[in-house]
């Protein structure tokens, strides 16, 4: 049971890292092309997804430590 929870946590962390990598790419693209809409989308949508996944990761981590 503990091992499964750790594997799930690892999957959440990897998924978040992939999202962050894409978000950084979008930031760079928006900055260099001066695309304000793309930058706005990063701030309004992608950042919120990352913040939400961070909370999920912290909650899962806390549950694992509590076991």
Image (cartoon, grey):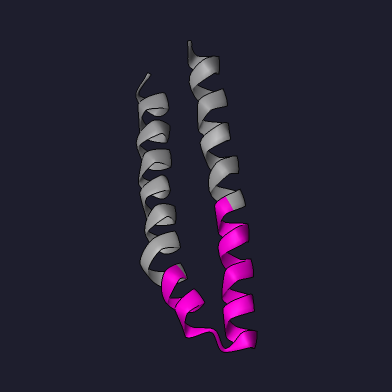
Q: Which of 2 and 35 is in front in this view?
A: 35
Q: Tell me which segment is drawn in magenta.
A: 19-41
- Residue 31: say if magenta: yes
Q: In this view, does 53 lie above or below 2?
A: below
Q: Is residue 31 above or below residue 7?
A: below
Q: Position of residue 22 (x, y in %)?
A: 61, 60
Q: Look at the magenta stretch and give its main secondary structure.
A: helix
> Could you tell whether 18 is left or right of 61 in the image?
right
Q: Residue sitting at 45 percent across and 61 percent down?
A: 46
Residue pictured at 35% horizontal, 36% vertical: 59
Residue farthest to the bottom, as pictured:
34
Residue 36: percent from left, percent from top: 47, 84
Q: In this view, does 15 lie above or below 65?
A: below
> Residue 48, image x and y in percent?
37, 59
Q: Which of 21 and 29 is in front in this view?
A: 29
For residue 17, side relative to residue 46 (left or right):
right
Residue 40 point in image, percent of width and height: 42, 76
At x 57%, y 74%, the residue is 27
Quarter of the image with the C terminus is top left
Relative side of 53 to 3, left or right = left
**Is residue 58 on the magenta stretch?**
no
Q: Which residue is drawn at 63% across and 77% down?
A: 28
Number of on-image labels: 0
Q: Is residue 17 above or below residue 29?
A: above
């Amino acid at each position: 049971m503990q091992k499964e929870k750790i594997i799930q946590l690892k999957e959440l962390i990897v998924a978040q890292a992939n999202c962050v990598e894409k978000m950084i790419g979008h930031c760079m693209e928006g900055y260099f092309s001066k695309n304000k809409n793309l930058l706005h989308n990063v701030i309004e949508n992608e950042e919120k997804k990352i913040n939400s996944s961070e909370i999920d990761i912290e909650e899962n981590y806390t549950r694992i430590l509590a076991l």
